[in-house]
Image (cartoon, rainbow, N blue to C red):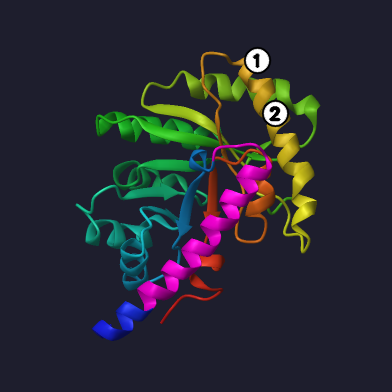
Amino acid sequence: MAKENRGGEVMGIKANLEMVQLKINAAATKAGRDPKSIKLVAVTKLMPLEVVQSAYDAGMHCFGENYPEQAVDKILAMEGQPQIEWHMIGHIQSRKAELVSRYFDKVHSVDRLKIARYLNRYCGELDKVMPILIEVNLSGEDSKAGFPAWHEDQWTELCISLGEITELPNIKVKGLMTMPPMFEDPEKSRPIYRQLKRLQRYLQDQIPNTIWDELSIGTSFDYEVAVEEGATLVRIGTELFGSKPVD
């Protein structure tokens, strides 16, 4: 990418970042929260390395990827950059668990017990402890990943699996993640996020040996609602980079 084009791209992404951050700050203030308690995860799936570099230069340090093999090249290229973090936010196939364990700093999308066991095994071999979030399905949609949790009568069984996960020595549960249906009106996400808060309180009571403080909720279409409802991590792609990968 030509130097002048790169400079323009950085400035464009920086302007988008400032806009998103203002909206996050306003939503946090409205809810009586400290804006600094919300971390923005820049979703760079399908984006080329040059966009990640421009985003980093624009002030972003936390990047979310869905596809481990595509992410590794970016992770290696950006290795050594101060404060950079890589979060796995997509569905994890069993055969990709080793890559995730090796290259990522945090996982948002542990959606079944088997994957937790794989991550624990590989992290043990790497002598590391991986912070993770448990992904739950609160909508009941077949297209959504996550532990079934859309009815409260499922929560007792959920606790059995999650209790086992919290005992695994090389992963550390930090909280929950969910994806609501794709509503046109972001307000329709609010009941899902409130249900997640209820589940969070339930787990804090039932599995008190684990801190369930983190909530990974909110994307470009509803992150202000998510912040108002307790998000600590918001996963933003389109608002920062546009709706299509940059050529």
Q: Which residue is mark 1?
A: 205
Query: Where 198 falls versus 45 (above or below)?
Result: above
Residue 220 visible? The answer is yes
Q: Nearer the viewer, residue 229 or 167?
A: 229
Residue 163, image x, y percentages:
56, 19
Residue 145 visible? The answer is no
Q: What residue lies at 52% left-to-right and 14% top-to-bottom?
A: 209
* Marks 1/2: CA–CA distance: 10 Å
**Chain part drawn in magenta:** 9-34
Residue 187, image x, y percentages:
78, 53
Q: What residue lies at 32% left-to-right and 72% top-to-bottom?
A: 50
- Quarter that holds the C terminus: bottom left
Residue 105, image x, y percentages:
35, 42
Q: Nearer the viewer, residue 170 or 19?
A: 19
Amino acid type indicated by mark 2: Leu
Q: Nearer the viewer, residue 67 or 19?
A: 19
- Using residue 224 as the reference point, say whether residue 47 is left or right of it: left
Which of pointers 1 and 2 lies earlier in the amino acid sequence?
A: 2
Q: Residues within 10 Å of mark 2 (few under 14, many from 20)?
A: many
- Using residue 85 as the reference point, say whether residue 27 is left or right of it: right
- Quarter that holds the N terminus: bottom left
Mark 2, secondary structure of its residue: helix
Q: Residues within 10 Å of mark 1 (few under 14, many from 20)?
A: few
Mark 1, secondary structure of its residue: helix
Residue 95 located within the stretch drawn in magenta: no
Q: Which mark is residue 199?
A: 2
Query: Where 132 falls versus 145 (above or below)?
Result: above
Query: Where 194 falls versus 244 (above or below)?
Result: above
Q: What residue lies at 53% left-to-right and 43% top-to-bottom?
A: 35
Residue 21 located within the stretch drawn in magenta: yes
How would you classify the magenta stretch by its main secondary structure? Answer: helix
